[in-house]
Image (cartoon, rainbow, N blue to C red):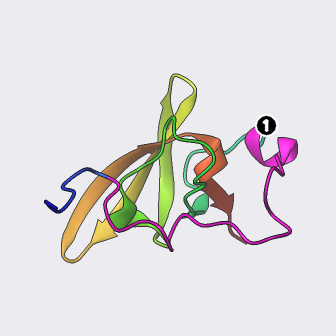
Amino acid sequence: MQKSKGQRQGTRSILKKGRLEKSRLNISQIMHDYEEGDRVAIVLDGAQQMGMPHRRFQGRTGFIKGRQGAAWVVAVKDGNMQKTVVARPEHLRALE
């Protein structure tokens, strides 16, 4: 069988939810309003596919740069490069 080469390949353990987290939707997390410059962590939610950033950004922290529709633009450091990630609020967690 040929190996999968999709964008979500190898994410079975990364996107798996625990027994107590399944089918739980945190409305306060989705409705959270961030300010520009707020520090956030990118934590992927496997149950929500829309607005999910690439899996290489799982666990990274960054700063909010602005808004893009229903999503937020986050500046993330990837090695020595500064990258921008567009993610919906269900994949973000506020820090501090």
Task: Give the residue at the far front of this rendering.
Answer: 1
Residue visible at 51% across and 34% down?
50
Task: Give the residue at the far left of this rendering.
Answer: 2
Quadrant holding the N terminus: bottom left
Find residue 75 and report its horizontal and vertical position in percent: 39, 55
How would you classify the magenta stretch by its main secondary structure? loop
Horizontal side of residue 81 vs 39, given as left or right: left
Find residue 70 and report its horizontal and vertical position in percent: 58, 26
- Secondary structure of the residue carrying numbered label 1: loop
Find residue 83 and report its horizontal and vertical position in percent: 27, 56
Which residue range is magenta in the image? 8-30
- Above or below: residue 67 compared with residue 21: above
Instruction: Inspect the magenta stretch and tell me whether residue 38 lies in it.
Output: no
Residue visible at 67% across and 45% down?
34
Tag count: 1
The one nearer the camera, 6 or 66, is 6
Q: Given the image, on which type of amino acid does mark 1 rest?
A: Met
Instruction: Inspect the magenta stretch and tell me whether residue 23 lies in it.
Output: yes
Find residue 14 and report its horizontal and vertical position in percent: 50, 71
- Above or below: residue 90 compared with residue 95: above
- Above or below: residue 31 compared with residue 7: above
Horizontal side of residue 28 vs 64, given as left or right: right
Quadrant holding the C terminus: bottom right
Locate residue 57: give its quadrant: bottom left
Residue visible at 63% across and 43% down?
89
Horizontal side of residue 53 vs 42, given as left or right: left
Task: Name the residue tied to disc 1.
Answer: 31
The one nearer the camera, 19 or 69, is 19
Q: Residues within 10 Å of mark 1 (few under 14, many from 20)?
A: few
Residue visible at 81% across and 50% down?
23
